[in-house]
Image (cartoon, rainbow, N blue to C red):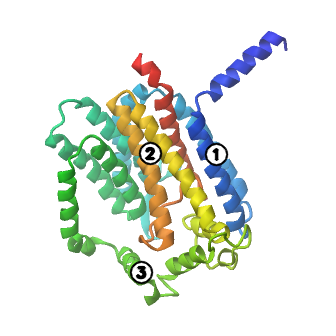
Amino acid sequence: MTLTDKHAWWRRIKSHIAVFDGALSLIIFLILAVGIVTLYSAGIDFPGRVEDQLRNILVAFVIMWVAANVPPQTLMRFAVPIYTIGVTLLIAVALFGIVKKGSRRWINVGMVIQPSEIMKIAMPLMLAWYFQKREGMITWRDYLLAALLLVVPVGLIIRQPDLGTGTLVLAAGFYVIFLAGLSWRVLLGLALAAGASLPVLWSVLHDYQRQRVMMLIDPTSDPLGKGFHIIQSTIAVGSGGIFGKGWLKGTQAHLEFIPERTTDFIFAVFSEEFGLIGNGVLLFLYLLLIGRGMMIAVNAPTMFTRLLAGSITLIFFTYAFVNMGMVSGILPVVGVPLPFMSYGGTALVTLGLGAGILMSIQRHRKLIQS
């Protein structure tokens, strides 16, 4: 290989790397590194978990790279088809989906998929597209139509039942509607209406969902049953103290008191081993992630990209807030992973896709402005 060929090869490599936003990539890498260290300890009795997660991370980065190369204009063109396909698949799941552990969430389309995961990205894409089309002409009717576009898939997801994913999709759509200029007075009215409708909502909840709420109020009423998750996770979080017990020295995790310790409850393992100081560092990393995402949203050149970037960033916040609140005993237990830390391929791919879209918006900002 000649010197010229080497320079050309290096330029191609740099052009591929350049699609990644440096600050955002570094923050995600640091959280992933913390996640792998914690997963090694949490999954010490589950051989192969770390290797599987490393493969999941590789897939997520490939998805991130692909998304970062897709211009926002292309994303906008595909917003309606992706949303339509997602809702159609949700209807198909309701009619003849695959049932696992009492939930009908999956469908076989040549391979088994969970369509509700598609809506985490399809929902903000669709609503951002709609408000972009109505820019400068938005009225209260547009907010009502946007709410209808949001309620339909959320209702189908909660019916499966999947309260965790339904909450995330609802949040993703709500953030777009809010960032599009929804009045604070309307938000106050919605909050009051939601409070007034709690008795009705309680009546339509599944038994296991009611039990989760009751366990939040008093987990000691069933310490060896429904309250076991919350009790053991809060014990782990509290027992870490200020400095933690040390890596690989968490007794709650290694004595198998913490359920789902490699997935939804990995924060309990981290808290026990690294303590309050470790939690402070982790929270700081998530604040940096959210701050970088909001900076990308603020600097985005169009309404579509601003709404999309803002919604995706706030979804990262929702993931972290709900998971940490659940593990700490201040929120009901729902199936929401800790972003970029919990074991699992589906959530990592969705998060990687979201991060890639943020990078695409940042990368193509100057091109759109010119």
Residue 215: image tag: 3
Viewer can see residue 110: no
Q: Alpha-carbon distance for marks 2 and 3?
A: 30 Å
Give 153 or 368, whichever is nearer the viewer: 368
Amino acid tagged 3: Met
Residue 206: image tag: none
The residue singled out by tag 1 in the image is: 29
Left or right of 263 in this view: 201: left
Q: Would you place residue 320 above or below residue 251 in this image?
A: above
Tell me which numbered mark, 3 or 1, is placed earlier along the sequence: 1
Percent x, y of residue 163: 38, 64
The quadrant in which residue 155 appears is bottom left
Amino acid tagged 2: Thr
Q: Residues within 10 Å of mark 3 (few under 14, many from 20)?
A: many
Amino acid tagged 1: Phe
Give the residue at x 27% y 53%.
151
Give the residue at x 59% y 45%.
27
Viewer can see residue 7: yes
